[in-house]
Amino acid sequence: MVLTASTMLSLGTKAPNFHLPEVVTGKIISLDNFADKKALIVMFICRHCPFVKHIQQELTRLDQDYSNSNLGIIAISANDAKNYPNDAPESLKEMCIEMGFDFPFCYDENQETAKAYTAACTPDFFLFDSDRKLVYRGQLDDSRPSNEQPVTGKDLRAAITAVLNNQPVTSEQKPSIGCNIKWKPGNEPNY
């Protein structure tokens, strides 16, 4: 495990489109699936990372808390499944079922979507407004597996609340910290 921080993609960046298979249904998901949503979270997670395991219950709560709202949620795993079989689509499908995720969880096999978002770690969160411009990127909250802070999702939740209420999102944003994305050999990005 290599401790890695978010790249902190520039605020205002337009959400890169993608066409990725959802691990439970096999259906292809793109930004168009969320066209009717006022806000969209794109999160890069995986199954084996201890930082994701630490927050996965909060991801389920976020899903439940915003299930009838104007927020779209999608999770993407871009980890190299050959070298990290726990992050292969079948294993991710098991995770979705175990955790009760209702949001689409997609697999980015060629890792191009992760590169387009400059995703660097798991977990890595990107929140876009109705114009699909980036308004928040970074951490869920201050909790880490070893710091005994409660997992509340306060940073991401505050940004979501602001967007859904047509309020500005604070520009004081902290990078997420987690395991590096497991790039395929020779496919590492330059950011």
Image: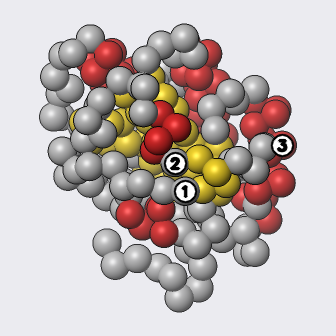
Residue 108 vs residue 96: left or right? left
Q: Horizontal and vertical percent for residue 23?
A: 74, 49
Provide the residue designation for mark 3: 94
Q: Quadrant of the C terminus?
A: bottom left
Proximity of marks 1 and 3: CB atoms separated by less than 8 Å: no
Q: Earlier in the sequence, mark 1 or mark 3?
A: 1
Amino acid type assigned to the residue bearing label 2 in the image: Ser
Q: Secondary structure at mark 1?
A: loop
Which residue lies at the image location 59% right of the left edge and 85% below the top edge? 185
Structural crowding at the residue carrying mark 2, measured as other residues with C-alpha within 10 Å and reported as few (<14), some (14–19) or many (≥20)? some
Mark 2 = which residue?
A: 30
**Disc 3, SS:** helix
Q: Amino acid at mark 1?
A: His
Tag 2 secondary structure? loop
Question: In terms of depth relative to the viewer, which is nearer, 164 or 59?
Answer: 164
Of mark 1 and mark 2, the one earlier in the sequence is 1
Horizontal arrangement in the rendering, residue 61 relative to residue 13 (left or right): right
Q: Amino acid at mark 3?
A: Glu
Q: Residue at x 19, y 45 (%)?
A: 11
Q: Nearer the viewer, residue 121 or 107?
A: 107
Is the N terminus in the top left, top right, bottom left or bottom right quadrant?
bottom right
| Residue at the farthest bottom position | 186
Picture coordinates of residue 154, whole percent (x, y):
39, 21
Answer yes or no: do the residues labelled 1 and 2 have beta carbons within 8 Å?
A: yes
Q: Tell me, for residue 19, which label it has, or none.
A: 1
Numbered disc in front, either 3 or 2: 2
User: Which quadrant of the structure image shows residue 156?
Assistant: top left
Q: Is residue 26 visible?
A: yes
Residue 105 marker: none
